Amino acid sequence: LIDRYLVRSEYWDIPAYLIFNKMDLYDKEEFDIAFEAERLKWLNVECFELSAANGKYSPQFLEQGFQTLLEKLTGKTAILVGQSGVGKSRLITELSEGRITLLSAETNRANKGSHTTTWAELIDGERFALIDSPGIRSMSLSDLTKEELIQSFSDVQEFATKCKFVSCNHAENNKGCFFQALNPDEKESQLILSRLDSYKRVLEEVADIPDWQKKP
């Protein structure tokens, strides 16, 4: 889902930040935050490690945390996107230093634990403006053409120029394919291949509809 958001970010030319929230509950055995942040380094996506529920939390795995995020958002308008329950509403409250309590947060308490925002809400945070958006489970990219998709996976597109043949589809056993020559046991290769895997997954969806049927 994050990679799909980043495709939209590149396609619409909107800078993206990736926020790792609820890090007070982090289990490094289940999720490698450093790997997930590093695999996006070719996209120049800035990553932040924080806990909206714990104002004293300090980053342990990444360089940037809550205070840096607050500084980056100052003077900007941004939208928070993500699945339900990731803490978007709570984060906005913390970024406003408690001055803002969202209607969605009040509704959640009334519903006794439901963590669902069902509308978009524009908040004036004085130093910034933020939009709290409804949580979504998936994001379709089927409106993009195959050409638009690869352009929006700019890192994969750049690596693909190293393939011997322009028509390479990066399939297993393809001769001259840059990706197939990578060593999956090496970390740098794992980072690159993880992005290729995301691209291929989305490509299957995009390819289901012929480009000529896409809406402009």
Image (tube, rainbow, N blue to C red):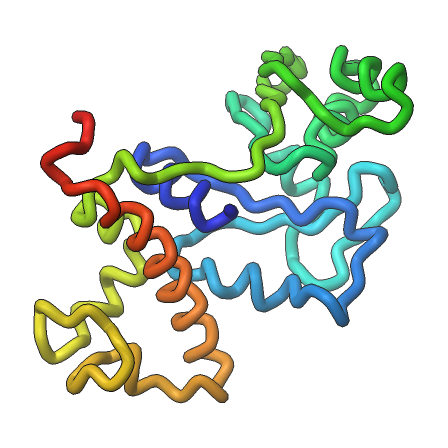
- Is residue 86 shown left or right of residue 134? right
Q: Indicate whether 195 appears above or below 68.
A: below
Q: Indicate whether 163 appears above or below 86.
A: below
Residue 51 placed where, x, y %? 79, 44
Residue 84 placed where, x, y %? 68, 33
- Where residue 26 sits, quadrant-wise, is bottom right
Q: Residue at x 69, y 64 (%)?
A: 31
- Where residue 66 sits, quadrant-wise, is top right
Q: Residue at x 65, y 42 (%)?
A: 68
Q: Residue at x 74, y 47 (%)?
A: 50
Where the C terminus falls, by quadrant? top left
Q: How many marks?
A: 0
Q: Indicate whether 167 appears above or below 127.
A: below
Q: Indicate whether 182 appears above or below 100.
A: below
Query: Is residue 96 or residue 101 the one in the foreground?
Result: 101
- Where residue 214 sits, quadrant-wise, is top left
Query: Is residue 124 or residue 146 the one in the foreground?
Result: 146
Residue 100 placed where, x, y %? 77, 15
Residue 110 placed where, x, y %? 89, 15
Q: Residue furthest front?
A: 208
Q: Residue at x 57, y 38 (%)?
A: 137
